[in-house]
């Protein structure tokens, strides 16, 4: 009997140990499921041990998810089982899951797991993304930080007053009564006010005492709300918007106030490449030391006129020209088609309020429709101002009125009133015409000077007369097409150097 009692006790202890082992395994399984399970946990169902009453396989991912989440529900956790039985049950469930996934394609399985863990990943990343915003919010001023006070100041003395407050703070720094303010601010563009940072209004009054420029703000100081304190020091960068083909003007240098056209914009370096009409002194001989130049000429040195780049004229004065693709290089400038292409900083140009004149656009051979031109407006003050280019001695032709096609020569000019002597055998007396009824008349062989347009200052011999007048330039030996109104009879010849202008049209020459 004693042995039977002892065996029963031993059996009871073994069963208790087995129960404890099963409870430990259940706890381990629960922790494992909590670590790798989804965020939405549900209470497990209790089924009869080792019995799979119904198992369906569907194409819906939700059923697959429920099948995976509840695969452990097939085990009756309320009943104790041996470790071998548990292992056998898990192998059965794993084989069922494996069979289920074999029937699915790879992309379907990938989409299933992507949806399953999407919610957890979104929650994880959103928490990380909030961290920089939280850090930025911590830098904003709060109720425990010093306040900002607005004080009236004498207009134009804002910066000087702030510097005076700084010097006063340094002078009283190691005394018995130092200034209690934290900072003083003069905002650029804000006239008549300064800002002082301090905890109390009495500290502000103590600091501004004795400043004559702050007498207006001595009796009243206004506190800036906490929500508006950051706006006081907000810096708004002025962005200059420049685009190709835009018209601009230069601020400084030899090309100051000259019209230029944007060719290329480099936003990374804040630079712009401009197309402009060069200003080259064709009368100055290159290759001569400055000490050998005439000092009187150097004193009388003026800004060269605008004129398209002429390689022949540059070579004739000793200039050295090199080639770089389509560009010609001369004295650090890049030239193409007669124009200068120069790269400058954005700060060197004016982009707003640019109104090119019609004469400037003619030099660029451009008259775009979207450009606002600065046309001369006749007012009551300058009603008598001359708006034509007629001069005494010009040959003219009547283009309007009863005497149309009548030709003559100008003998006097009085404002808009032009007096001509007609070239007609029946008309012996001088006739008066308004300027708008006359036009300049030229014939082949006339020597003229260009007084307007892109070829201004050039001279030449007329070779054809059409809608435009075609002349042969004395300087470049090229044909130029000019409007009749921009020409004037002239006997002089334009020349940049002494070696030019020595020949006339029709002279016999020898080629070297």
Image: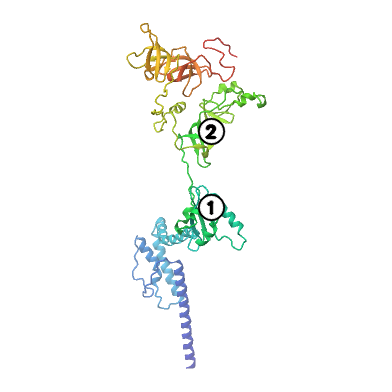
Q: On residue 99, which mark appears?
A: none
Confirm whether residue 287 shows in the render: no
Q: In this view, does 49 lie above or below 206?
A: below
Q: Badge 1: few (under 14), some or many (20 or more) residues near its Cα, within 10 Å?
A: few
Q: In which quarter of the image is the C terminus?
A: top right
Q: Where is residue 169 in the image (x, y as percent from the top left)?
A: 58, 57
Residue that numbered label 2 is attached to? 342
Q: Badge 2: few (under 14), some or many (20 or more) residues near its Cα, within 10 Å?
A: some
Q: Position of residue 498 (x, y in %)?
A: 59, 17
Q: Which residue is drawn at 59% across and 62% down?
A: 177
Residue that numbered label 1 is attached to? 212
Farthest bottom residue in view: 1
How does the figure colour the protein chain or chains?
rainbow
> SS for tag 2?
strand
Q: Is residue 78 above or below residue 190?
A: below
Q: Which of marks 2 and 1 is in front?
A: 1
Front one among 145 and 259? 145
Front one among 296 and 466? 296
Q: Where is residue 393 in the image (x, y as percent from the top left)?
A: 45, 13
Farthest right residue in view: 291
Q: Which of marks 2 and 1 is nearer the N terminus?
A: 1
Q: Is residue 255 above or below residue 218?
A: above
CA gap between label 2 and label 1 equals 52 Å
Front one among 392 and 318? 392
């Amino acid at each position: 009997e004693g042995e039977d009692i002892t065996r029963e006790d031993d059996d009871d202890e073994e069963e208790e140990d087995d129960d404890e082992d099963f409870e430990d395994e259940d706890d381990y399984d629960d922790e494992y499921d909590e670590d790798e399970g989804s965020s939405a946990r549900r209470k497990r169902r209790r089924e009869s041990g080792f019995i799979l009453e119904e198992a369906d396989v569907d194409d819906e991912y939700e059923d697959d998810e429920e099948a995976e989440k509840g695969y452990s529900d097939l085990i009756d956790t309320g009943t104790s089982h041996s470790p071998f039985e548990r292992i056998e049950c898990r192998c059965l469930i794993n084989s069922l899951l494996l069979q289920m996934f074999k029937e699915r394609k790879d992309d379907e399985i990938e989409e299933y797991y992507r949806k399953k863990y999407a919610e957890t990943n979104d929650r994880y990343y959103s928490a990380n993304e909030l961290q920089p915003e939280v850090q930025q919010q911590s830098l904003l001023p709060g109720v425990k930080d010093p306040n900002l006070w607005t004080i009236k100041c004498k207009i134009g003395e804002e910066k000087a007053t702030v510097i005076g407050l700084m010097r006063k703070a340094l002078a009283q720094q190691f005394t018995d009564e130092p200034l209690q303010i934290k900072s003083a601010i003069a905002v650029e563009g804000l006239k008549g006010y300064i800002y002082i940072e301090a905890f109390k209004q009495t500290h502000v009054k103590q600091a501004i005492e004795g400043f004559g420029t702050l007498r207006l703000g001595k009796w009243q100081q206004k506190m800036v709300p906490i929500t508006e304190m950051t706006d006081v020091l907000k810096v708004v960068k002025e962005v200059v918007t420049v685009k190709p083909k835009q018209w601009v003007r230069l601020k400084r240098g030899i090309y100051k106030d000259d019209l230029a056209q944007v060719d290329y914009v480099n936003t990374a370096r804040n630079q712009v490449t401009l197309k402009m009409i060069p200003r080259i002194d064709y009368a100055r001989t290159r290759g001569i030391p400055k000490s050998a130049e005439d000092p009187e000429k150097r004193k009388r040195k003026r800004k060269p006129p605008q004129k398209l780049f002429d390689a022949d004229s540059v070579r004739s004065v000793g200039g050295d020209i090199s080639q770089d693709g389509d560009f010609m290089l001369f004295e650090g400038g890049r030239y193409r088609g007669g124009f200068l292409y120069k790269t400058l900083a954005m700060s060197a140009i004016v982009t707003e309020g640019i109104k090119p004149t019609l004469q400037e656009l003619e030099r660029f051979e451009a008259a775009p429709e979207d450009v606002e031109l600065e046309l001369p407006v006749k007012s009551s003050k300058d009603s008598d101002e001359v708006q034509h280019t007629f001069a005494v001695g010009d040959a003219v032709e009547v283009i309007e009125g009863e005497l149309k096609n009548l030709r003559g020569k100008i003998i006097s000019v009085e404002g808009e009133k032009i007096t001509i002597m007609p070239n007609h055998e029946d008309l012996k007396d001088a006739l008066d015409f308004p300027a708008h009824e006359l036009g300049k008349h030229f014939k082949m062989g006339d020597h003229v000077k260009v007084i307007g347009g892109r070829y201004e200052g050039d001279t030449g011999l007329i070779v054809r007369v059409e809608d435009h007048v075609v002349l042969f330039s004395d300087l470049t030996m090229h044909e130029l097409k000019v409007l009749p109104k921009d020409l004037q009879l002239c006997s002089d010849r334009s020349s940049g150097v002494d070696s030019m202008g020595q020949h006339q049209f029709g002279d016999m020459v020898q080629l070297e």
